[in-house]
Image (cartoon, coloured by chain):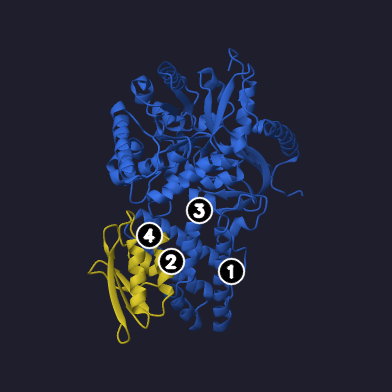
Chain colours: A blue, B yellow
Amino acid sequence: MADAPGERAIAGITASDGLVAGPLVADRPAPAADRVAGTARREGEVLRGALERAAGELADLAGRGDALAAEILEFQVALIEDDDLVGPILSAVAAGEPADAAWRFALDREIAEYQAGGDEYMAARASDLADLRDRVLRAIHGGDADGPAAGGAGGILVADDLSPSRFLELDWRRLVGVALRTGSRNGHAAILARARGVPMVVGLGGAAVLPDGAPAILDAEAGRLVLYPGVEAEARLRDGRTRRAALALEADGVLERPAVTADGEPVAVLVNVDDPGLLDTLPVARCDGVGLTRTEFLFEGGALPDEERQLAAYRRILAWAGGRPVTIRTLDAGGDKPIRGVTDDGESNPFLGVRGVRLSFTRPALFRAQLRALARAAAHGPLKVMVPMVTVPSEVERVRALLAEVIAGLSADGVAHAVPELGMMVEVPAAALTAGDFDVDFYSIGSNDLVQYATACARDNPALIALSDPANPAVLELIGRTVEAARRRGVEVSLCGDMASEPTMVPLLLERGLRTLSVAPAQIGRVKLAIAAWRRGAAA
Amino acid sequence: MSGGDAAVGQARIDDPTGLHARPAVKLTKLAKGFAAAVEIRAGADGAWVNAKSPNAVMKLKAGHGQTLHVRADGDDAAAAVAALVALVKRNFDG
C-alpha cells in the first residue's frame, strides 16, 4: 500500500454528536455517461424496466411510515404512471432515441417549466422531478438506483447541503453519518439529525475534496472528518467508541428513570417532537411529557391541514403521552421555515419579519382553526398551548381573546373541548427582559432564536457559528431573568431549545435555576446523565 | 371532445394552498377510475388539460379561490364530473 493516499483531516463543525467510521458515499451520484444504447426495441424494454424499478423503490420508501416523505414520494410515483408524460418518451425511444437521452431530455424540459416563474412551491416540485429523473437514470444505467440509501451500507453520506425532505427520505439505518460541505448547525436538517442521533459534521468547505468510497472517520465530537485514517487514528477511533459505548450503556441505564441531580433534586425531562412518527419508536417512560411540539410538520408538503386533521394529530400525541403534559406550539412559520401559501417570501430579512405569532395574526382563519383544534384536543388530556415569537404582552392578550372566542363558539355548538393553559415562548430578548409583565400560565425559553437575536447572528449563516454561542453571558442573563420572573409569578418555566439537549450546557441551565428541560429524543439519556452529575454550588 | 355522453361541472378551490401535489395526485387517481375522457381547467379562460395526468394538473397551478371547471366525455361522464366536483368541494379530503 505504498501509494495509498495519506491521512488528511478536514475541519468542520459538529451539528449532531457522534463518532463513526465508514466509506464516503456521495449523495445522488451522477449516473455514468458512457452507456452504449441498444436497438429501439431493447431501449424501450430498458426504459420500461427502469420506470418499474423506480416505482417499486419509491413505494418501498413511502412505506416507511414517514408522512412528509410519503407525500413527496407519492407524487413521484404518480408521475411515473402519467401516460401523458411517459407516453411521448416511450414513442421517442421506439423511434430510435436511446432510453437515457430521451428520458433526460423530457424531464429536463419539465423541470425547466416547473422552475420558470420563480414560484417557490413549484421549484420544490422541480427538485422532486430531478430526484425522479436521476433515480430512473441510475436504473437505466443498471447501477444502484436508490443511490446511497440502498447501497453504501455503513457509509458516511457526503453532500453540499441537505434539505429536510432529503434527510427524511434517506434510510438512516444504512448510513452511519453525514458530512456536509456547507450546511448549518442550526438548520432544520441538523435538528432532525440530532433528534434521531445521526452524527453530522457541517461546514467542511465548498472546495473540500471528498472522494466517493474513501475510508473516513466522522469525528462529530471534535467536528472533523478524517480521510484515509492511519493506524493511530484508527486506534483513537476504537478508544473513542469504547468510551462512547460505556457512556451509552450508562445513559441507557438512566433512560427510563426520573432525572435527579447529585443533590437529589428532581428535574423534569420532556421531549421535543418535530414529527409524531418519531413517537412510535420512543418509549414514553423515558420522559416526563412533551415540552415542545413543532406543528410545522402538519403544514409541510402542500395542503394546509384542516381542523379535523390537526385534532387527530394532537390527540395522537396526547394518547402517546398517557396523561403526561403535552405542550403544543402554534404555527411557527417564517424565518427559515417558509410555508407555501402562508408565509410572505418577499421579506428582506425573514428572521426579523412577520413570523411566528405575528404571522398567525395575519392569517386569522388559519389561526382560529388551529386554536379550535387545540381546545378540542384539550378535552382528551393535559394540553398546553405555547405561542411563538411573542414580543409584547398585548400579543398574548390578543391570543387569549381569540382563544376565548373560539371556545365560546365550541360551547355554543356543543362540541367537546377544554380550556388549555396558555404560555409563551421566550425567544425575543425584549420579551425575556420583561417576562414578568406577561400574563401567561407558563414560559418556555426558545434558546435557538434567543441566541440568534441576542448575539445578532443569523442561525443559518455558517460563518457566524463561533459567535452565536449559547453560553454567551448575555444569553445566560436573559435565561436567568426569565426564570426569576417565572418564580416570582409562581408559574412554570422550561427551556426547549437545542441548549437543553447539549450535555455541556445542562449545568449552565441548572445553575440558572431551570428544573424543566425539553430535549431531542435521542439525547434524553445523555441529558439525564449530565443532570445526575450536577451538584448545587459546584462550578459549572 | 365529442359524441357519447358529455358532462360539465365546476367547484371553487377552498384549500388555501390551492391545487398542489397531494390534491393533484388525488384528483388524477380519481379521474383514472373512469372510462370517460376527463379534462379540467383553472378559471373560465384557462386551457383544458387531461385530468388523468398529474404532471398536467400540477402545472395548472390552480390557486386558492379559483374555480376548477370539469368536463368529461364518455359512458360514465356524468359520474366522473360529479366525483371530481365532490372531491374539490370537500377540500380533497379522503
Disc 2 target residue: A108
Tell me whether marks 4 and 1 sit on the same chain.
Answer: no
Q: Nearer the viewer, mark 2 or mark 1?
A: 1
Q: Which mark is residue B20?
A: 4
Amino acid type, callout 4: His
Tell me whether marks 2 and 1 sit on the same chain.
Answer: yes
The crowd level at tag 1 (other Cα within 10 Å; few <14, some 14-19, many 20+) is some
Disc 3 target residue: A67
Residue at x 53%, y 23% (from the top left corner): A515
Give SS at disc 2: helix
Relative to A458, A534 lies left or right: right
Q: Say if A537 sits above or below A500 in the image.
A: above
Residue at x 39%, y 44% (from the top left corner): A373
Disc 1 target residue: A53
Amino acid type, callout 3: Ala
Q: Say if A81 sits above or below A1 in the image.
A: below
- Give me the chain letter of mark 3: A
Tell me whether marks 1 and 3 sit on the same chain.
Answer: yes
The crowd level at tag 2 (other Cα within 10 Å; few <14, some 14-19, many 20+) is some
User: Residue A135 occupies which quadrant of the picture?
Assistant: bottom right
Residue closest to the eye, A118 or A12: A118
Q: Nearer the viewer, mark 4 or mark 1?
A: 4
Contact (CB < 8 A) between labels 4 and 3?
no
Relative to A196, B80 lies left or right: left
Contact (CB < 8 A) between labels 4 and 2?
no
